[in-house]
Amino acid sequence: MMRSLRRWATAAVLLLSGNQLMAASAPCSAWWCQPAVTPEKLNRALQDLNAWVTEEARKDVYYTRDLQPMPMDETLKAFDKNGYNNIYGYGYLHWVLKKSAKFVSLLYPGYFITVLRVNTNHPYSNPTGSHDAHGNGLDVDMGYILTHPNDESSAIDFEAQFWFVYMLYTEARVVSSHRYSGFSYIHEMESYLDSAIARAMIPKHFRFSGITDPWEFSHISHFHFGMNPCNKPVTRTAVGPRCTP
């Protein structure tokens, strides 16, 4: 009897171990496990981005401490929303946005970033009359990146959204400190982050810090990014504006 029980227990352990092994080796079907961006594609985009930086970093607009109109192009487009018809901000916020938008366009030709609002109107005015963080020229509302950028009904391209946010955080950390970023799909972004780290595509220490709950701050329909002000001179460098240490 005892021998039969031992044989049954051993078989049960082997069966459980086999099921665990199968579960561990089962392919992941989630979108973040099926990336379109390969290490080779990422490296080419970063090389092309560095060439762009060499030329773009010479422009004076990125170094001013005054509110300046956002320099738009095919990678960064404005969308007039509720009377917010001027896009003004500080120079180094423009730099962070432009570089991140350029990066996305290199990874995904034809993609662009939609800017909904930085500063409202200049001089500052708020159509609703309420307090507005955007008045300091350091906060920006953006539309999510779509799989078909010119079709507002198309789905969000989560992978492209990840790489845009990644470059925002990477560059803002160098220029000055970023304040917060509210978006509805932070858990999906973090899942892709784990996948990208596992594929040695980004540094192991990288994290999305300063995330706020998008439900609390009404950021379901759009993405918000904010930077702390640089209270020291903004230094001109070959890689763009930097906040003097």
Image (tube, grey):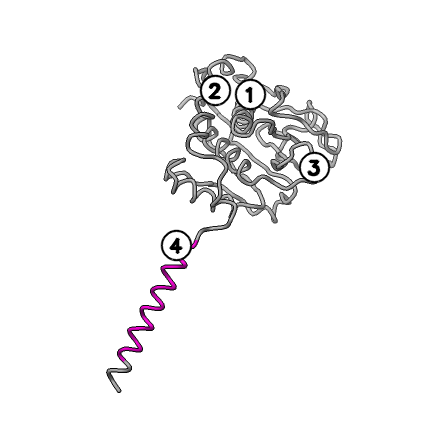
Q: For the residue labelled by badge 2, is the local secondary structure a helix, a strand or a loop?
A: loop
Which corner quadrant holds the N terminus?
bottom left
* Along the viewing direction, whichever of 114 and 9 lies nearer the viewer: 9
Residue wearing tag 3: 152
| Nearer to us: label 3 or label 1 | 3
Residue wearing tag 2: 241
The answer to whether 15 appears left or right of 67 in the picture is left
List x then y, in percent, for residue 212: 54, 45
Say what amino acid the circle numbered 4 marks.
Ser
The answer to whether 196 appears left or right of 68 in the picture is left
Q: Work out whether mark 2 precedes mark 4 in sequence or the reverse, and give the earlier one.
A: 4
Residue located 34% across and 73% down the image: 12
* Along the viewing direction, whichever of 49 and 143 lies nearer the viewer: 49
Residue wearing tag 4: 25
List x then y, in percent, for residue 190: 47, 45
Span of residues in magenta: 6-26
Q: For the residue labelled by badge 4, is the local secondary structure a helix, a strand or a loop?
A: helix
Proximity of marks 1 and 2: CB atoms separated by less than 8 Å: yes
Number of numbered labels in the structure image: 4
Residue wearing tag 1: 91
Q: For the residue labelled by badge 3, is the local secondary structure a helix, a strand or a loop?
A: loop
**How far is disc 1 from disc 4 in space, using C-alphas?**
49 Å
Say what amino acid the circle numbered 2 marks.
Pro
Q: Is residue 58 above or below residue 245?
A: above
| Nearer to us: label 1 or label 4 | 4
Q: Is residue 24 magenta?
A: yes
**How far is disc 1 from disc 2 in space, using C-alphas?**
8 Å
Which corner quadrant holds the C terminus?
top left
